[in-house]
Image (cartoon, helix red, strand yellow):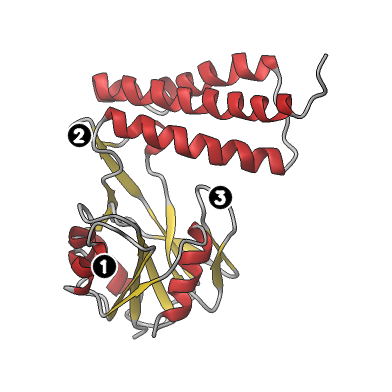
């Protein structure tokens, strides 16, 4: 039976880290890399984790790859501090690894709690995340935002959900949108993507219709409406920031 190391990368996550670690106590090893927190996160992590390392922040993918390299086991369950492994998911992982699996990685459906309910609609669901993988066949990519694991070999799906407590409130949601859209715009710009006035006009309403109508945000009442609007705002802001980056390079008229 392959053993599993649960890994977390954290920085100033005192409000979340204990609950995240408690949800993976069943793992064969728990390893945390802290990026020089100032709120006592490492001390809280040491209460549960087998190993806690403090390292400077090199970026999401680099830190997650380092965590996998430091693990004692080849199978890695990568968790963020605002995520929780449910008992049902823990059981399914143990069943999947009861013998050496043919798959080299497993995608897990993630459900986010926001505005007082679990959101199982919009672009947020099922939000499959490849978090359980064999480090001999997988590695985190170098993207600045929304990083993911690239696995060489078969990837299967699990059914039990990974719980995500992403936002404290709408103000926190907006702060995250500001940070992520800046990173996304820079990444798109570096890849040579271009944006036009038509794209700025067309993409946000299309994103709203996709979230609210096609992907069922309407079923979640006011929270579904708010999230659909916020997701379309994310699309607008990402493209607007990309346009701004490109405009700055243009010679003055």
- Up/down of 136 relative to 15, above or below: below
Mark 2–mark 1 Cα distance, whole angstroms, equals 30 Å
At 40% from the left and 25% from the top, the residue drawn is 230
Circle number at residue 163: none
**How many numbered marks are there?**
3
Q: Nearer the viewer, residue 29 or 119?
A: 29
- Can you tell which of label 2 and label 1 is closer to the viewer? 1
Label 1 SS: helix
- Tell me the residue that label 2 is attached to: 117
- Up/down of 26 relative to 57, above or below: below
- Up/down of 184 relative to 101, above or below: above
Q: Residues within 10 Å of mark 1 (few under 14, many from 20)?
A: many
- Can you tell which of label 3 and label 2 is closer to the viewer? 3
- Can you tell which of label 1 and label 3 is closer to the viewer? 1
Q: Position of residue 114 (x, y in %)?
A: 25, 35
- Up/down of 209 relative to 167, above or below: above
At 32% from the left and 80% from the top, the residue drawn is 98
Mark 3–mark 2 Cα distance, whole angstroms, equals 29 Å
Counting residues from the start of the chain, the first of labels 2 and 1 encountered is 1
Q: Position of residue 18 (x, y in %)?
A: 18, 62
Q: Position of residue 192 (x, y in %)?
A: 75, 39
Residues marked 1 and 3 touching at CB (< 8 Å): no
Counting residues from the start of the chain, the first of labels 1 and 3 encountered is 1
Q: Residues within 10 Å of mark 2 (few under 14, many from 20)?
A: few
Q: Nearer the viewer, residue 74 or 181?
A: 181
Q: Residues within 10 Å of mark 3 (few under 14, many from 20)?
A: some
Mark 1–mark 3 Cα distance, whole angstroms, equals 24 Å
Counting residues from the start of the chain, the first of labels 3 and 2 encountered is 2
- Tell me the residue that label 3 is attached to: 144
- Tell me the residue that label 1 is attached to: 42
Label 2 SS: strand
Residues marked 3 and 2 touching at CB (< 8 Å): no
């Amino acid at each position: 039976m392959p053993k599993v190391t649960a890994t977390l990368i954290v920085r100033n996550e005192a409000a979340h880290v204990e609950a995240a670690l408690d949800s993976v106590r069943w793992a064969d090893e728990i390893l945390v890399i802290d990026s020089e927190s100032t709120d006592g996160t490492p001390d809280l992590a040491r209460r549960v984790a087998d190993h806690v390392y403090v390292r400077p922040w090199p970026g999401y993918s680099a830190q997650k790859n380092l965590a996998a390299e430091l693990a004692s086991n080849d199978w890695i369950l990568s968790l963020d501090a605002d995520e929780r492994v449910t008992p049902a998911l823990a059981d399914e992982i143990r069943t999947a690894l009861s013998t050496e699996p043919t798959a080299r990685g497993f995608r897990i459906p993630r459900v986010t709690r926001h505005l007082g309910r679990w959101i199982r609609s919009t672009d947020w669901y099922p939000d499959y995340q490849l978090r359980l993988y064999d480090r001999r066949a997988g590695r985190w990519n170098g993207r600045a935002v929304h990083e993911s694991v690239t696995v060489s070999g078969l990837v299967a799906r699990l059914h039990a959900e990974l719980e995500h407590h992403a936002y404290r409130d709408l103000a926190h949601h907006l702060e995250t949108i500001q940070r992520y859209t800046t990173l996304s715009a820079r990444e798109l710009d570096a890849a040579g993507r271009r944006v036009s006035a038509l794209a700025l006009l067309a993409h946000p309403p299309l994103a709203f219709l996709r979230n609210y109508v096609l992907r069922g945000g309407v079923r979640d009442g006011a929270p579904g409406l708010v999230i659909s609007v916020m997701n379309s705002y994310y699309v607008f802001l990402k493209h607007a920031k990309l346009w701004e980056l490109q405009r700055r390079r243009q010679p003055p008229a």
